Amino acid sequence: NAGVMQNPRHLVRRRGQEARLRCSPMKGHSHVYWYRQLPEEGLKFMVYLQKENIIDESGMPKERFSAEFPKEGPSILRIQQVVRGDSAAYFCASSPIGDSYEQYFGPGTRLTVT
Amino acid sequence: AQSVTQLGSHVSVSEGALVLLRCNYSSSVPPYLFWYVQYPNQGLQLLLKYTTGATLVKGINGFEAEFKKSETSFHLTKPSAHMSDAAEYFCAVTPNSGGYQKVTFGTGTKLQVIP
């Protein structure tokens, strides 16, 4: 039973480019959460999605960031016009229906903006 | 609103010594509490969780934690540290109030195990 998959594991972008981070939840999980981890800080919640719906995006920056979880395919976190401050580890987690507090984490995507 | 405070961003113990990582929480309703471990360049792995029932919770790798409501604490312990325990540990809380609730993470404690 494969766990949460994230790709790419490492992503380097120059300032102004777009970054696309992908997350495939565990089989049978339809809830996806995105977190950002900055050096020396804990995980900060960004967004919670169910299939085709954004449930809670209270942690998402108002500009340049967007997320989707289509009916088919992985969840995508998209960062437009990246800046150096976007450099961080981005983690995706998934949970089964009804158990949103027990989350299973992927290995993360480490984004470096040069 | 809920929050967690992890005392000590870095903790060092000798191999074989007791591990004690501190976590205090703040929650306006009864909480669910968690400890996660993160090894370098990896995602978080659930060590243990408290939801309801027994306040002493046993997890993987010999770790356990005790929910103390009077102290609003959920400290993580292991009787004897092993080199493989070196990692970063995160305490987390979410309200036990049904439906969707955000999980709030602490800032983490890096555990160093000295041979």
Image (cartoon, grey):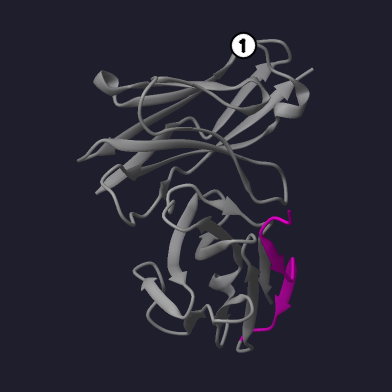
Q: Is residue B72 left or right of residue A52?
A: left
Q: Is residue B51 left or right of residue A68?
A: left
Residue B34 versus residue A81: which sits nearer the camera?
Answer: B34
Rendered position, B42 above or below B8: below
- Res A75 → quadrant: bottom right
Please provide the residue range marked out in magenta: A1-15
| SS category of the residue bearing label 1 | loop
- Could you tell me residue B65's position as x and y percent? 48, 22
- Res A25 → quadrant: bottom right
**Residue at screen point 24% across, 49% down:** B1
- Res B87 → quadrant: top right
**Residue at screen point 37% across, 80% down:** A62
Q: Label 1 is found on which chain of the structure? A: B
Residue A11 is covered by the magenta coloring: yes
Residue A26 is covered by the magenta coloring: no
Q: Is residue B77 left or right of residue A113?
A: left
- Looking at the rendered structure, the kind of residue marked 1 is Pro
Residue A20 versus residue B114: which sits nearer the camera?
Answer: A20
- Could you tell me residue A10's position as x and y percent? 75, 68
Of all residues, the one furthest to the right in this rendering is B115
Rendered position, A99 above or below A12: above
**Residue at screen point 41% across, 72% down:** A60
Of all residues, the one furthest to the left in this rendering is B28
- Could you tell me residue A15's position as x and y percent? 63, 84
Q: Is residue A62 left or right of residue B97?
A: right
Q: Quadrant of the C terminus of chain A?
A: bottom right
For the residue carrying disc 1, how many other residues have a C-alpha within 10 Å: few (<14), some (14-19), or many (20+)? Answer: few
Residue, disc 1? B79
